[in-house]
Amino acid sequence: MLPIVEIVNLGIRENPTIWKVSLMTTYDNPVRTDCLKNKRIRIGWDQYGAEVSEDTNYEHGGRIVLDSFINKMQIGDIVMSCYTNKIVDAIGVVTGDYKWDDKLSEYKRTRAVKWLLKGIEEDIYELNKKTTMTLSTVY
């Protein structure tokens, strides 16, 4: 009897970008808990409003992060949730476009994610050429 081989479509696009995402801050926090429970990622800079453009005054920073999250991140890309500067606690695939969720009190910028792994504590320091991850929200 031949073994049954199951082909699973994880939703990863060809040549995906792999993004490191900080969910609010390091370690356990309300935004991380919400994201892992509700299959999404969230970032802040809410003070700029739902839509940003070249005319936005980025007085609080965030121009590159917002551009990456809103315009460069694509459905089928991979996201790694950064638990610390060396440890990843979840890995997922982006399944939705950028959305602004006014029902949230903060960190209203969202994208839907299919979490492939959650609750892991994978030290990727060695895999990352012995380089720690920065605390930048998205890169």
Image (tube, rainbow, N blue to C red):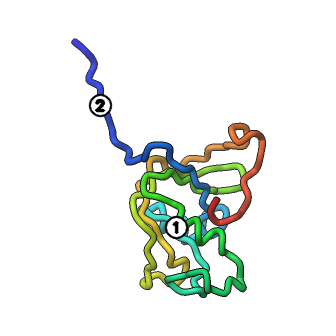
Q: Amino acid at mark 1?
A: Asn
Using the image, tell me which numbered label, if any, was put on residue 103.
none
Residue at far front of view: 54
Would you name the residue on which mark 1 appears? 71
Is there any visible trace of residue 97 in the rendered image? Answer: yes
Which residue: 67% across, 75% down? 62
- Secondary element type, mark 2: loop
Mark 2, residue position:
6
Q: Please identify the quadrant where the C terminus is shown.
A: bottom right
Q: 35 or 60: which is nearer to us?
A: 60
Q: Nearer the viewer, mark 1 or mark 2?
A: 1
Along the viewing direction, whichever of 102 and 19 lies nearer the viewer: 19
Seen at 55% across and 47% down, the residue is 120
Crowding near pointer 1: few (<14 within 10 Å), some, many (20+)? Answer: few
Give the mark, 1 or 2, whose residue is nearer the N terminus.
2
Element under label 1? helix
Q: Is residue 38 visible?
A: no
Give the quadrant of residue 48. Answer: bottom right
Q: Please give left or right for residue 26 compared with residue 7 in the image.
A: right
Q: Residue furthest left?
A: 1
Which quadrant of the figure contains the N terminus? Answer: top left
Mark 1 to mark 2: distance in Å?
34 Å
In the image, residue 50 sits, relative to residue 23, either above or below, namely below
Disc 2 marks which amino acid?
Answer: Glu
Residue drawn at x 33%, y 38% as measured from the top left: 8
State yes or no: discs 1 and 2 in contact (Cβ < 8 Å). Answer: no
x and y, in percent, of residue 89 in the image: 58, 52
Which residue is located at x 42 percent, y 64 percent? 112
Report crowding for label 2: few under 14, some 14 to 19, many 20 or more residues within 10 A (C-alpha).
few
The image position of residue 119, as x and y in percent, is 52, 51
